[in-house]
Image (spheres, grey):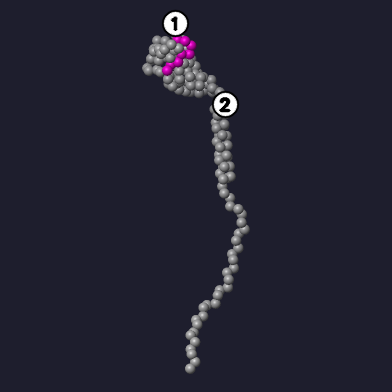
């Protein structure tokens, strides 16, 4: 009966072949093999699963989804519920890398600017010239006591 599960019911947990599904009314436990669950699509990190009782959604982690291969701009994703092919934008990765690189360069340039502006630069002063030393003073002379005249 396709009306048993309303559109986009959410699988909250999978243990073996038993899925716990959150419906508008309550939680339901379903055997994925019995309802012929097959992965239909993946958008972002949400998998859409077609069954003989309706459409379910779940986080890709719940079905162990992994990118198996990439051929051109098509990714093959495998999961516990089968395989799906997904078109990927061929330029998305390059743009992401380029914007990350430019962001890092801008951050580095800004950091250098801050460091240079905070660095204390001593004012330029003329180089001191060595002072000429005063002429040496004469050695001290010994004073002889005067002898009284007899």
**Residue 9 is inside the magenta segment:** yes
Residue nearest the viewer, comparing 136 with 86: 136
Mark with earlier residue (2, 1): 1
Q: Residue at x 59, y 64 (%)?
A: 130
Question: Which disc number belongs to residue 1?
Answer: 1
Number of residue marks: 2
Asked if labels 1 and 2 touch by Cβ distance under 8 angstroms, the answer is: no
Q: Residues within 10 Å of mark 2 (few under 14, many from 20)?
A: few
Q: Is residue 6 visible?
A: yes
Compared to residue 126, the image places residue 50 above or below, namely above
The stretch in magenta equals: 1-12
In the rendered image, residue 96 lying in the magenta stretch gets the answer no
Position of 135 relative to 68 (above/below): below
Instruction: Give coordinates of residue 129: x percent, y percent.
Output: 60, 63
Secondary structure at numbered mark 2: loop
Q: In the image as oriented, which residue stretches furthest toward the left?
A: 16
Q: Which of the 4 image quarters holds residue 28?
A: top left
Real-space CA distance between mark 2 and mark 1, rounded to the nearest whole angstrom: 43 Å
Q: Residue furthest bottom?
A: 150
| Numbered label attached to residue 91 | 2
Residue under the point 59% across and 66% down: 131
Q: Residue at x 42, y 10 (%)?
A: 35
Residue 41 on image: x %, y %: 49, 16
Q: Nearer the viewer, mark 2 or mark 1?
A: 1
């Amino acid at each position: 009966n396709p009306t048993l599960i309303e559109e986009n019911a959410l699988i909250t947990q999978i243990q073996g072949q038993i899925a716990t599904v959150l419906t508008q009314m309550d939680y339901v436990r379903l055997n994925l093999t019995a309802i012929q669950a097959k992965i239909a699509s993946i958008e972002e990190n949400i998998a859409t699963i077609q069954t003989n009782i309706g459409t379910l959604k779940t986080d890709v982690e719940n079905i162990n989804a992994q990118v198996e291969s990439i051929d051109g701009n098509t990714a093959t994703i495998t999961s516990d519920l089968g395989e799906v092919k997904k078109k990927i934008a061929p330029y998305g990765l390059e743009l992401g890398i380029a914007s990350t690189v430019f962001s890092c360069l801008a951050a580095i340039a800004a950091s250098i600017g801050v460091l240079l502006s905070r660095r204390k630069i001593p004012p330029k002063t003329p180089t001191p010239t060595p002072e000429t030393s005063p002429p040496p003073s004469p050695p001290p002379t010994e004073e002889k006591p005067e002898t009284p005249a007899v």
